[in-house]
Image (spheres, grey):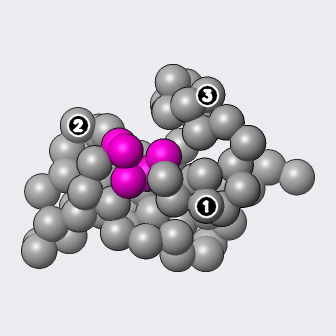
Amino acid sequence: MRRTVVVHPPSPTGGRRVTIGGEILGLAYNLADVEEFLRRAGVDDPDVLLATAQGAIEWHGGSPEEWT
């Protein structure tokens, strides 16, 4: 079963909440943080997800380049 990874809009204080299957993984401040959260969540190859971010990760409220 595929769990949906969502990077939420930037917060007013900086960073973006990251969830997978509705579970909060943490607050990311860059792509490396997203990759680490996915690794900790047991995603086998976070590099593949990040390379295909448009299909594998839902970016809400901004692109992967927007963090503040």
Under mark 1, the amino acid is Arg
Residue 29 vertical position relative to residue 25 in the rendered view, above or below: above
Number of the front mark, 3 or 1: 1
Mark 3 sits on what residue? 48
Residue 41 vertical position relative to residue 59 in the rendered view, above or below: below
Foreground of the two, 4 or 43 = 43
For image coordinates 23% across by 37% down, the residue present is 65
Q: Circle 3 — which element?
A: helix
Mark 1 sits on what residue? 40
Dot 3: few (<14), some (14–19), or many (≥20) neighbours within 10 Å?
Answer: few
* Mark 2 or 1, nearer chain start: 1
Mark 2 sits on what residue? 65
Residue 39 vertical position relative to residue 55 in the rendered view, above or below: below
For image coordinates 52% across by 75% down, the residue present is 24
Under mark 3, the amino acid is Val
* Label 2, label 3: how far apart the Cα atoms are: 18 Å
Please name the predominant secondary structure of the magenta segment in the image. helix
Under mark 2, the amino acid is Glu
For image coordinates 31% across by 39% down, the residue present is 64
Which quadrant of the view contains residue 21?
Answer: bottom right
For image coordinates 79% across by 49% down, the residue present is 2
Q: Total label count?
A: 3
